[in-house]
Amino acid sequence: MTADEAVLALLCPKPDLSQLTGEPAGVLAAAQTAVDAPDGLGTVASCATEVALPATGTWSDPGRGGAQADIVVTASGDGVPLLFAEIGNCFESAQVLAAKTDKYTRFGQRKVKDLDGRERPMWRTRWWAPDGRHGDQPHPPPLLVFNRIGPRDPGTDIAQLAELTQRHWKGTAYEGGFHTYDGKLPIVVTGMEHLQEHGPAGAVFRRFGRPQNQTLLEAIDNPRREAHDARKHSARQQEYKEQPRRITAQEKAERGRPAVPCAPTAAPGSPTHGGRPSSPPGGAPRVRPTRTCATTASSAPSPPSVKPCRPGPSTSSTTRTCPSRRPAAPGSPASAADVRTQTTAGQDRPARPWRLLPGPRQRVPQGSEPVGRVGEELVHQPGRGPVRLLLIQIFRPSRDFPNQ
């Protein structure tokens, strides 16, 4: 009879007022009160009584050491995927109740092979429940309902039971003010009178380890963890929305920053130039032979100092001198194709800006202005000889031609 009362208190069935026409006023008032009360959990089909939870054996032939739930509630649509209810009439001591709690824990920890050959908790082969968060997957919660019929004091027994079963329900605390209960047993207690009066929606349930009463859904869940996750998600969303504005402000600040002046040009033989002398030991300056380019093929073998150039528009066989790649002598004008810079060791930019000198293969687009540098540098590397570094000129639309 006690289990049936608990089932009705959990279900909170609603009477059909249309079927009570002609009933006394007291009956109608009671029916109206039941209709106005909060909804319960599931339907009659959501509850099963006297269900064996085997720690050994099978579902049909359970072995010793297992638990037996007075009521099993499966109401996923109402937020309670699986709930084991244990009804007590205040005749059993806290030690006996602690032994029952151990059996619930063993049943939750038991794993069997499913049809796919994988091991999973045995209770998942019969009932469905969400997988939960990674690292926070507790066992199905037991609800202990105390019906004050026997001589024992429920308040005293509950305090002793919480101390005896602490290893089963105590979670792991985190800095965000929440706990995780991976592999733990959430134990919830309440009284029969409170359950019948307020139903599962009333704040009359106490979970071990929490200082205040909660509703049944809050007691079996982890609201502090959910609130922490919600704040963290909101902070990420706010940061994502502010990212474009922050990037725009950073780019604006970089555009308004003054340019860094270039360093003065160092002499080729100075320490800041890498310590490389301008001439080899002995005082004789280095001399490179003048290279000539042949625009057309010739039957005579070309000397080592002759490199073929690209064929020009002329088809006549002529020989022309290629522009010298060595730095121009002081005071001599630089040709259109002989534009170069002088750099110092450890610097990535030219020592001084150079003006753009258009050549036959380098033209300035109309309405553009240079933003980079053009030139080259001759660097001597051991084992490879002279290596030429080429600097490229980059253009951008000029301010004087906004429509370009």
Image (cartoon, rainbow, N blue to C red):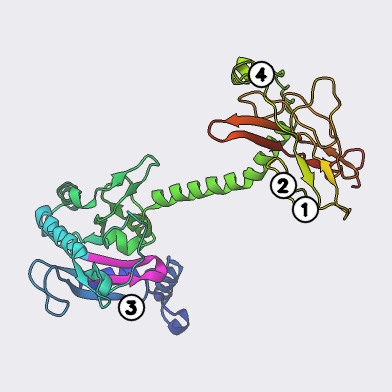
Residue found at x 69% / y 17%:
267
The range drawn in magenta is 71-85
Determine whether the residue tagged by mark 2 lies in a helix, strand or loop.
loop
Q: Which residue is mark 4?
A: 284
Q: Closer to us: mark 4 or mark 2?
A: 2
Task: Report the number of discs.
Answer: 4
Mark 1 closeness class: few <14, some 14–19, many ≥20 residues within 10 Å: few
- Amino acid carrying mark 2 in the image: Ser
Residue found at x 22% / y 60%:
144
Q: Which numbered tag is attached to residue 44?
A: 3
**Is residue 8 part of the magenta span, yes or no?**
no
Residue 156 in the image: above or below residue 370: below
Spatial separation of the CA atoms under disc 4 and disc 2: 28 Å
Q: Closer to us: mark 2 or mark 3?
A: 2
Q: Which numbered tag is attached to residue 298?
A: 1
Q: Closer to us: mark 3 or mark 4?
A: 4
Determine whether the residue tagged by mark 4 lies in a helix, strand or loop.
loop
| x, y percent for residue 126 | 26, 75
**Is residue 79 part of the magenta span, yes or no?**
yes
| x, y percent for residue 217 | 37, 59
Determine whether the residue tagged by mark 3 lies in a helix, strand or loop.
helix
The answer to which of marks 4 and 2 sits earlier in the sequence is 4
- Amino acid carrying mark 3 in the image: Val
Spatial separation of the CA atoms under disc 2 and disc 3: 103 Å
The answer to which of marks 2 and 3 sits earlier in the sequence is 3
